[in-house]
Image (cartoon, coloured by chain):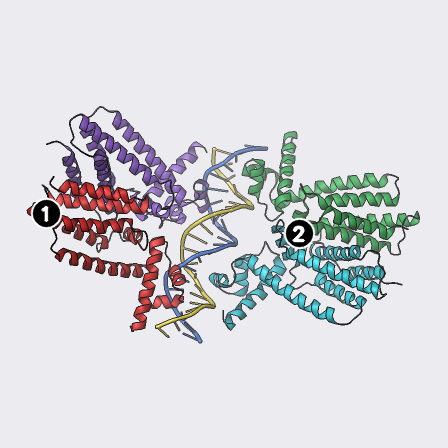
Chain colours: A red, B purple, C green, D cyan, E yellow, F blue
Amino acid sequence: MGEKSLQKKQYILETARKIFSEKGYKNVTMKDIVEACDISRGGLYLYFGSTKELLLELLQQESDETDDTLTRRITEEDSAADILTLFLKEQKKEILQKKNNLAMAVYEYSFEERDKKNSILRKQFDAGTKIVEKLIESGIASGEFYCENPRGAAENIMYVLEGMKINSQTIGITESMVDEQLLYIMQGLIIE
Amino acid sequence: MGEKSLQKKQYILETARKIFSEKGYKNVTMKDIVEACDISRGGLYLYFGSTKELLLELLQQESDETDDTLTRRITEEDSAADILTLFLKEQKKEILQKKNNLAMAVYEYSFEERDKKNSILRKQFDAGTKIVEKLIESGIASGEFYCENPRGAAENIMYVLEGMKINSQTIGITESMVDEQLLYIMQGLIIE
Amino acid sequence: MGEKSLQKKQYILETARKIFSEKGYKNVTMKDIVEACDISRGGLYLYFGSTKELLLELLQQESDETDDTLTRRITEEDSAADILTLFLKEQKKEILQKKNNLAMAVYEYSFEERDKKNSILRKQFDAGTKIVEKLIESGIASGEFYCENPRGAAENIMYVLEGMKINSQTIGITESMVDEQLLYIMQGLIIE
Amino acid sequence: MGEKSLQKKQYILETARKIFSEKGYKNVTMKDIVEACDISRGGLYLYFGSTKELLLELLQQESDETDDTLTRRITEEDSAADILTLFLKEQKKEILQKKNNLAMAVYEYSFEERDKKNSILRKQFDAGTKIVEKLIESGIASGEFYCENPRGAAENIMYVLEGMKINSQTIGITESMVDEQLLYIMQGLIIE
DNA sequence: CATGAATGAGAGTTCATTCAT
DNA sequence: GATGAATGAACTCTCATTCAT
């Protein structure tokens, strides 16, 4: 695939992201993509065979970016509390993001693939839990945090985040609600 | 509508519940219902005009039942901790329920109606939060619980439950994971 | 069929007339009639097997009434000009009538039965032509009218009336337009 | 839309004309068109979204042709009587035309759209009336015609034509009947 | 590579008509 | 007589997918 083709592929992906963000997963048709991209029906099929392929490629790209961000951050030598705060801020942004937010599409896609193992969401959740757990343990070691059950606390935090994420897509959530909860979480860890 | 009709309507609803439970919301067609019920196309339309109508009626029934259960329980004279434990047990059942679980369908439906106000999920969430808050306050008054921010704690609990609910529908969750979290929640409140 | 049944039949017919008047022929369904009459589906079928039957019975009744009116009028001993004026007034009423006007339904019905002989419209038209022709001849005999071709004039008048009738149902027609034409017709006959 | 597509569109229109001519408007379904054209369901929808769209496009084409014909004729330097005779001959052809005659479909369509302003029939009728009126006035000026009320006469003629047109679609009309009337009309105008 | 016409499966919906009660 | 639940045929419309150009 030549340079020009790669550009076109990327263009289609970006357009598709907008549409998935607006309409979710199941409501998006190949026709929607074709029309939004203003390309021919056949032209789209040269690059992607289905909306599923499109979404998966988008998620792959997103996952790559996130990995990068996280890795870069973790290697910095900030305190555990600082890194956790950064992590939560990142999560907050995701929860409240209005434009180009694939969350709804991903949920719908996951419903579709419910019984299959290779879940993107599963990896994300497990990775997040592990990071948070490590940070808590590191915070305990450095005397920043007090926590009797780091694993449980980490899972608890991840579920809260997940709960806010889904609520944001269904019944909505305000920034102050998110802030309150993030504060609540940090207060539960930090030694007064 | 006669006695017999009501029975048939109920039969359709029960069949529809099975299907919604298996296929979610958007994937369910009137044809699916018709075939599962083994009735005629037109026959179904006598009772329900769309899958939306079907789902909403199912949710109404479910909501009525839940209201009953909750009310009955609250009036009993148990301690706050006992009632909260009961509430969480009920939630656990919902989270882990495999058969006839409308959760996925409700999420999908909520995505569809995301911009509208009259959300079933919103009501459920707000009502749940209020109940938990009251229970925490009542537990503090009776000396069972210690909590500096009952409202925040209540919301925290609700988000955890919501997080487990959605995870159960996407990446799955085990009973022991749920138990751990419920224990974690109760330990955060109870005075040791 | 008992007294009560006859009343019910008449009630259905009157209700049907309203509906045919509003929606024409093809757009009227048995369901429309059933709902407007607030009777059961099966109940309607006891009296009428189709919308066609309903319309035909309505037209029969109307035709009976018209015959009566015309006969009564003709037998009176007015002048030809007076009777023709009365006839045209009657036609004017029909052309402009807004409520319970079956004209549109009759046209649609005639389209449906275009190739069949037994046309209600045919009878009406021929009868009308004959009447007008006789009146013109009688007017000539009495010195009221001047006309070289009574048959042609009668047909001409009938076509004008027909033209106004159909226009009234399609593009609309005002009372003054009708009056103008009727005046034009009479002036063409009366000796100045 | 390419050359080939335009040909296909025209082919569909011509086929549709046949069907409208045979079955009117309301009785024609997209399925009828599809079958008559021997194309696929979806294929038809590429060109026309409904039978209404089809009919309107047909009428547009017809109207364009008529405009051309009329314009060409009017610019010729014939006498008023000659032109009027030509106009009536054209009308006669329309009235008696058996094949591909959209009259019935247009009437039905007009019933459907009865309360709307932008009527095709209205434009046709008004345009026709104006033309006839001008011709009569021009004939008076040139000494060919005698007429005290050109407007009334023009409307009269148009109603007669309209009456014959609708009768042709309902109860039928013979060529000799039409000829008689056209003669009657011309005799009413020409100075003996 | 790219186009867009074409196909056909499938979902939604409405009614005429029947029939057990 | 009267009811209204039930059936199934018929129609509308939309897309995923293919394929000749």
Image position, residue A121 (x, y; %): 23, 53
Q: Is residue A11 in sight in this rendering?
A: yes
For numbered disc 2, what is the local secondary structure? Answer: helix
Q: Nearer the viewer, residue D51 or D88?
A: D88
> Dot 2 falls on which chain?
C
- Horizontally, residue D5 falls left or right of residue A174, namely right
For numbered disc 1, what is the local secondary structure? Answer: helix
Image position, residue C6 (x, y; %): 65, 33
Image position, residue D174 (x, y; %): 76, 60
> Dot 1 falls on which chain?
A
* Label 1, residues with CA under 10 Å away: few <14, some 14-19, many ≥20: many
* Rendering quarter of residue C20: top right
The residue sitting at 73% across, 51% down in the picture is: C164
Q: Amino acid at mark 2?
A: Thr
Residue matched to label 1: A139
Q: Nearer the viewer, residue C6 or C136?
A: C136
Q: Amino acid at mark 1?
A: Gly
Query: Is D41 above or below relative to D113?
Result: below
Residue matched to label 2: C170
Camera-nearest label, 2 or 1: 1
Image position, residue B124 (x, y; %): 31, 37
- The alpha-carbon separation of the residues under discs 2 and 1 comes to 84 Å
Query: Is A123 above or below relative to B94?
Result: below
Q: Is residue A129 in sight in this rendering?
A: no
* Label 2, residues with CA under 10 Å away: few <14, some 14-19, many ≥20: many
| Same chain for the residues under marks 2 and 1 in the image | no
